[in-house]
Amino acid sequence: MFFTIAMAMAMEGIFTLLAALAPVKYVGAALFLQALFVAGIPIAGFIAVAKTFNREMRSLATGIIIAASTVFGSGMMSYLLGVSGDLYSYRLGITVLGIFLVLASALVFRIRELE
């Protein structure tokens, strides 16, 4: 299960990098493929929560994870991409985001399942 999440994150990061660095005529294809992999992450994430937390903690863990991902994913990342666009370029911000996504995919293997 964690391998699936790691591969989806890595592919999302790779296609984010391609969207930032590719010529303009290929950006649409890169964004389509990126969205294809992004759609699978929440489903696999909920399964990972079920395998990581015991029954009593699942609802609390799910709430905290969704709140944190909303704050950092939708809020903080949008702000940082805007700052990057104002100070230098959006291409740099999206490239850095893609690099971080690829690197973060390796952290998934540090999650431990319930025994």
Image: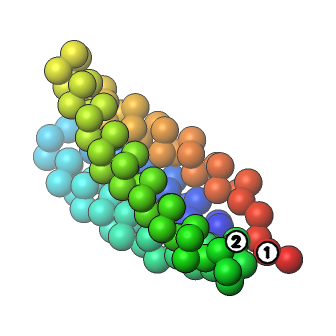
Residue drawn at the location 65% of the way across and 66% of the way down: 3
Left or right: residue 32 compared with residue 106 = left
Look at the numbered disc 1 and give the secondary structure of its residue: loop
Which residue is nearer to you in this view: 106 or 28?
106
Residue drawn at the location 77% of the way across and 64% of the way down: 112
Q: Which color scheme is applied?
A: rainbow
Which residue matches tag 2? 52
Amino acid type, residue under disc 1 in the picture:
Leu
Question: N-terminal of the two: label 2 or label 1?
Answer: 2
Which residue matches tag 1? 114
Query: Can you say whether 100 is above or below 74 in the image?
Result: above
Residue 95's x, y, as percent? 35, 33
Q: Residue furthest top?
A: 87
Q: Is residue 20 visible?
A: no
Residue drawn at the location 55% of the way across and 61% of the way down: 7
Residue 61's x, y, as percent? 58, 67
Q: Residue furthest right?
A: 115
Task: Tell me the distance, in whole angstroms, between the alpha carbons under discs 2 and 1.
Answer: 5 Å
Whether residues under marks 2 and 1 lie with C-beta atoms below 8 angstroms apart, the answer is yes
Q: Quadrant of residue 110?
A: bottom right
Left or right: residue 94 compared with residue 64 = left
Residue drawn at the location 24% of the way across and 62% of the way down: 32
Query: Can you say whether 82 is above or below 33 in the image?
Result: above
Q: Is residue 34 visible?
A: yes
The N terminus - image quarter? bottom right
Q: Which mark is residue 12?
A: none
Query: Can you say whether 7 is above or below 99 in the image?
Result: below
Amino acid type, residue under disc 2 in the picture:
Thr
Look at the numbered disc 2 and give the secondary structure of its residue: helix
Residue 115's x, y, as percent? 85, 77
